[in-house]
Amino acid sequence: MVSARPSLASTSRGLTVHSSRTRFAGRLDSGVRCHTTHLGGHMLKAQLATTIAFVMCCSSVQAETTAKATCEPTAEGSRNLVVSFYTQALIDKQVRAAFDTYVSPDFVEHKPDVPNGSRSAVVDFLEGLVTELPGARWEILRTVAEKDLVFLHARFSPAPGAPPYAIADVFRVDNCAIVEHWDVVGPPRDGMPNKNSRF
């Protein structure tokens, strides 16, 4: 009789599920590989899919819980949370992961370029921007935190050597999650009469 008890192993590309006498290998989700036995393969595959979904869900919840556990409900804690979010989302270009970790489901966006001002619309907007401008670079210059607000001044370069944009972001934080965002964008200008840098 074939053993139907799988073993789980982590790999650099995701979670791999193994069982004895492997005959079939199929993709369940990106980064997840499932090996089933030749006896009762359909049943085992369904059980493995459920197990993997549970493990992946727990990993996401654990990441969010860890982020909230390290957050302090102070102005400085909010500043650290916003800097971590900005770094992951824009500097490291992991938009969706950053939103999953640091942003409230009820997030409100005030940027006029984003339809509906919803969380999902912002994720789509930023992922599209990162895809369209693969050489883009964001740099945090300074931050100020006051009560539940974090102000962030940044330099955005759409491509290497391109004239930079000046960005002023304002985030509102509640219960260790980003709940609201405003921004002001200053595009490059020719013939600046003021020689003092915007940065």
Image: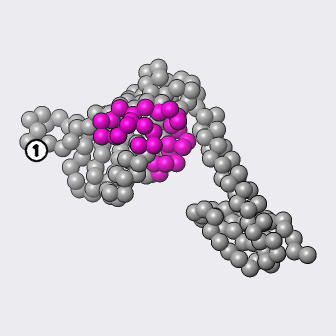
The x and y percentages for residue 112 are 30, 36
* Residue that extends furthest to the right in the rendered view of this protein: 1
- Give above or below for 136 relative to 194: below
The crowd level at tag 1 (other Cα within 10 Å; few <14, some 14-19, many 20+) is: few
Residue type at mark 1 is: Asp
Residue drawn at x 37%, y 53% is: 128
Q: Is residue 42 left or right of residue 173?
A: right
Where does the N terminus fall, quadrant-wise? bottom right
- Give above or below for 25 relative to 160: below
- Image quarter for residue 7? bottom right
Mark 1 lies on a secondary structure that is loop
In this rendering, the count of numbered labels is 1
Q: Is residue 20 visible?
A: no
- Image quarter for residue 23? bottom right
Q: Is residue 135 visible?
A: yes
Residue drawn at x 23%, y 56% is: 161
Q: Nearer the viewer, residue 132 or 42?
A: 42
The x and y percentages for residue 46 are 73, 62
Q: What residue range appears in magenta? A: 94-121
Instruction: Indicate whether residue 152 is drawn in magenta.
Output: no
